[in-house]
Image (cartoon, coloured by chain):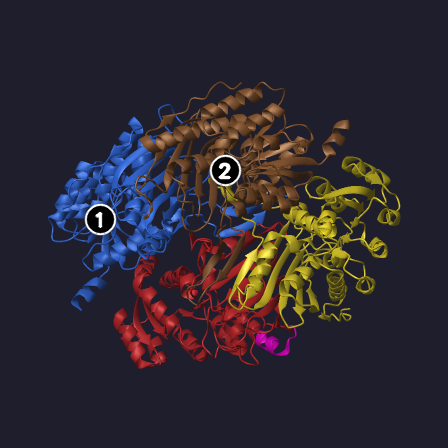
Chain colours: A blue, B yellow, C red, D brown
Amino acid sequence: MADDLAGRAELRVAVLGVGVMGAFHVDRLSRTVHGARVTVINDAAADRADTIACAAGARVEPDPIAAINADDVDAVVIASPGPFHAEQVSACLDRGIPVLCEKPLTTSPESAYEIVRREAALPGRLIQVGFMRRYDAEYVKLRTLITDGGVGDPLLLHCVHRNPDNRPEFDSSMMITDSVVHEVDVARFLLGEEIAAIQVTKPTAKRGTPDGQWDPMIVLLTTETGKVVTVEIFARTGVGYQVRTELVGSAGSAMIGLDLGLISTVGPLGAGHWGGPVAPGFVERFATAYGTELQAFVDAARQGTVDGPSAWDGYAAAAVCAAGVEAVRTGESVPIHLQPRP
Amino acid sequence: MADDLAGRAELRVAVLGVGVMGAFHVDRLSRTVHGARVTVINDAAADRADTIACAAGARVEPDPIAAINADDVDAVVIASPGPFHAEQVSACLDRGIPVLCEKPLTTSPESAYEIVRREAALPGRLIQVGFMRRYDAEYVKLRTLITDGGVGDPLLLHCVHRNPDNRPEFDSSMMITDSVVHEVDVARFLLGEEIAAIQVTKPTAKRGTPDGQWDPMIVLLTTETGKVVTVEIFARTGVGYQVRTELVGSAGSAMIGLDLGLISTVGPLGAGHWGGPVAPGFVERFATAYGTELQAFVDAARQGTVDGPSAWDGYAAAAVCAAGVEAVRTGESVPIHLQPRP
Amino acid sequence: MADDLAGRAELRVAVLGVGVMGAFHVDRLSRTVHGARVTVINDAAADRADTIACAAGARVEPDPIAAINADDVDAVVIASPGPFHAEQVSACLDRGIPVLCEKPLTTSPESAYEIVRREAALPGRLIQVGFMRRYDAEYVKLRTLITDGGVGDPLLLHCVHRNPDNRPEFDSSMMITDSVVHEVDVARFLLGEEIAAIQVTKPTAKRGTPDGQWDPMIVLLTTETGKVVTVEIFARTGVGYQVRTELVGSAGSAMIGLDLGLISTVGPLGAGHWGGPVAPGFVERFATAYGTELQAFVDAARQGTVDGPSAWDGYAAAAVCAAGVEAVRTGESVPIHLQPRP
Amino acid sequence: MADDLAGRAELRVAVLGVGVMGAFHVDRLSRTVHGARVTVINDAAADRADTIACAAGARVEPDPIAAINADDVDAVVIASPGPFHAEQVSACLDRGIPVLCEKPLTTSPESAYEIVRREAALPGRLIQVGFMRRYDAEYVKLRTLITDGGVGDPLLLHCVHRNPDNRPEFDSSMMITDSVVHEVDVARFLLGEEIAAIQVTKPTAKRGTPDGQWDPMIVLLTTETGKVVTVEIFARTGVGYQVRTELVGSAGSAMIGLDLGLISTVGPLGAGHWGGPVAPGFVERFATAYGTELQAFVDAARQGTVDGPSAWDGYAAAAVCAAGVEAVRTGESVPIHLQPRP
């Protein structure tokens, strides 16, 4: 009963980093998530922090560590650039408050594992990593198909991940660490296993791709029991955002992401076309999943717990991606050796 | 054995009327139908007859009745204008050779019934009416779902029939007699019952439709046991050709004609579109069905029989369409009273 | 600034009636809607009220009018049986607080119009009617297609509304007033016009339907400018919940509700089947729309306004449904005459 | 004109090998292909030859070479086991008559290349290889999308090839030579390039797969300009036959084979399912393509020519598959070195 009353108090959240992703989180927390309020905003860009804070009715704190330790903060959402994550997550662990950290957990497997160990030494979990696809209704259905045995033993996954465009510095390494990292987590989530090896095949790139860069690429993941995941990663299709996953099991298969929601038929005489719009970007495709993710974080935090993808999930993904960056360079299959799970 | 040998002789066909439809039949008979050859061509337009005959290696016969009675003709395909059908079909009955008559069988229920009676007095069937949808693989699957009981008792049909365009004289009456006639036959084919009443609702027409004409229209057919068929008929969508039928039964439903064969994803950044081309016209949509229809006619004729939609089907459709034309005029539900089936 | 602060106060909501729909609203308000809290629960069944109130951390108020007038209530959600709506909505108008009233607004066009007039005499709107489809992402896309001119002038709508099952007393009249009422509002929302006439066609009923009842039925709505809406209403398919709407315009068409989200392929050898699950009920199909509807109500209430479907929308739907019940009885097209809009 | 008359003579065909595939060809030639007649049947199993010949009105010739050289044979269809192909095709070249040879052209790249050289020394082509997918309407649409530039420069192909079941001796090598061979030809047909390397990844096999065998497998083909083709090959899904190909270009993508032709909705209350049947086998999926392939062979032969996939296509596929068998064994990427094209 006391717990229940405690759980009803509105969660006061500090958001660190209010670029596209962080601003989106502030908006969700302020407008559609139940039981939370953004009280503190931090960003390296003072004017951006001011604008977002003003709209959200929050205050600005220029020092991220001070924000984490502020009296009016019960929990933290980290959406700052990756290099700041290790220190900011550590500060949350120090204070002992829940933190939702956007991927990557940190920028290296080593620093991520250090976080895993530090959290493991605490009485309970504090870290949720922002792999939002685990909250997407279609991915949840795929996972349910596996746990229900609806398609038999899972054998393969085929993933397609196409971005419409990206900023110039988004290179082939970032295609692994920033994009394929989602498929790495999806594979671990759906198959319930660690990834043991990664190989990257580099087709002739789309015209206009800079020398030494590849786009699209084909990634092959092999799990510890030998299941295989194929991933097409395409950073700049010029069209729209498409994320599709097909599960192949011993008794059937299932595909999500075809996105046949609205079927219209239009066009000039003799050249008519049926179909529908492609989602323009990840915000449109995963808006509901992001909201569900935040709600789950807030709900758990108000009950004194943390749920969803863990620091270990963040570490394992980082380890696979580090091997993936090497695989881009060498063209060879690169094995992944995880540290012991604490 | 003798029958079998007889069956193997190549069927020599006269084609009467070589407009779009007739020319298409000549082409199929000359290039993809097994066991047939076009020997005689007749058309009111002499030069058109010459061109088609030359390409097909056939001769021209300027008199349709002479064509029917020619020594080098075993069977007849009638694709001439409707007003000529009654006389031409009668001549085929007189000579006792098989005839595939494009719809309409004749231009009035009375003349169609006269044909039914004359054929019934002969020892066997000679007439097949050109309702090609009965040979379309998807309609066959719908029919099989009904006969197999896969969706329980059939209760409703929803039909959509959209033409991209039509010649100026194609008025609201012709929308019934030339277009909805296909849904009338589909309903009779799928449900295995006669149509007992027809009602036509006339929405405000698409801009540009002449005064006194309606496009699109909504047609309601009621069968003798009270099943209901809804039909959207649209003569000039400006887009493409779409024919869709949904069967609603007591244990489920089934839809054909969505035409999701090829799914492409293209388009400028941020305005991408997935989908596929709409069939431009009935030839593309039903090309295979027309071929199957002709093959069935030829196969049966070579065995001395006739198969497929009968003169009675042609008469019943004519009776429904005549009532439909009245229903367009009056806006009332018009009952259909069929003559006794001989 | 003061307004903004006011807007941030948590909205305290009384929920009247906690059957399936009301309990669902309490759950949404307590768990996923931002900025609201259920403080008071009222229901004729005391134990049901207790259970729901306990889970929501709210108190029970046995008198609905007292609940509406309670000090700890800023806004009201009415999900009680229809016959109580008129009095309860009136009490909200008396006190001057916002109310989200589940359909029907009241049980007769006359009483609904009385509500419309009483609200119109107040300084601003207080009533939102629970037509949740206006908040469904797919219906919003259809509406956008119309306002953007993407399919030209709208001409027709084809609606399919299939319920898996219903309680025994759900008769053909209720199929109009409780089910088709949604299509009536969808038609008004999409086309932006009033309905001028309604006709109901009664096919032979599914086996097991009681004498004097019809299931399924075909409803035709005609708008004031002559657009036509076809509706298949089916109360007990025995399969699942399917709601589909196709818009036909002068330059194209568009369909929502095919629900092709997950495509799996399973089955015994030689009898494999591809496809996906049918939504079992309206809660699953429209869960997100209900949440969005409640969020919109709460957001507006916290700003001192009301948004969404209005009392007039509730009145117009009631008038169409009353005519529809007569149309079920007579089989004739029944005209709808609306009172002047205040 | 003389050519045209020659072209009209009925083609007399010998069919060598009347197992499943050969019997299917006999049936098409006897019943739906225009301008051909099966005159001679040869098969190692005398009773099978008798049965098929009797039904087709053909005679049996126990010696295949005698069948090829018979007076009543104008052209040959080879559907005998692969090891006989080299000698039988050679005999057709010796006599100078057209031959449609089921894949494989021969059982080794060396013997296939020998056939290529022998045919190249003749005045014109005589060999068509039975890669029927080139005649499938959907593959033709994909090819047209490429030649029209509709999806920009082709970059990737993703292929799925799932068989419902196979005989026990169908091992991982045969999965390459008998199944993936179709994707090899599809890739060459669509991309218009040779395959330069092949790699095979072997996931943990479906339970019940014999030791030393893998099912499913992932095949990666790389073309001479660096385009990449991914292939999932699955020999025994237990479900049905699924062949899907997605083309990814620099300006969009396109997929065929989803096979959404008939959408039904059935099932017990609360567990309803929408979808349609999976094609049970390759005959159902590609029946029309086989017919079109045969018609193209017959049409060309009657004009004194040969069309479609050539001996070179057969040789190139054989070379890729030989490398593929090695790749199954080694797990390494195996380069393909083609002999000079004569």
Residue A110 in percent (x, y) is at 17, 36
Query: D337 or C208, which is in the foreground?
Result: D337
| Magenta stretch bounds | C323-333
Distance Cα–Cα, label 1 vs label 2: 38 Å
| Figure label count | 2
Residue D219 in percent (x, y) is at 39, 35
User: Dominant secondary structure of the magenta stretch?
Assistant: helix
Chain containing the residue with disc 1: A
**Residue C331 among those drawn in magenta:** yes
- Apparent side of residue A102 relative to residue D130 in the rendered image (left or right): left
Residue type at mark 1 is: Ser
Residue B152 in percent (x, y) is at 53, 67
Q: Which is in the foreground here, disc 1 or disc 2?
A: 1
Label 1: how many Cα within 10 Å (few below 14, some 14–19, many 20+) = many
Query: D77 or C342, which is in the foreground?
Result: D77
Q: Against B3, is A280 above or below?
A: above
- Apparent side of residue D127 relative to residue A220 in the rendered image (left or right): right
Q: Which residue is mark 2?
A: B268
Query: C217 or B262, which is in the foreground?
Result: B262
Label 2: how many Cα within 10 Å (few below 14, some 14–19, many 20+) = some
Chain containing the residue with disc 2: B
Q: Which residue is mark 1?
A: A310
**Quadrant in which the N terminus of chain D is drawn:** top right
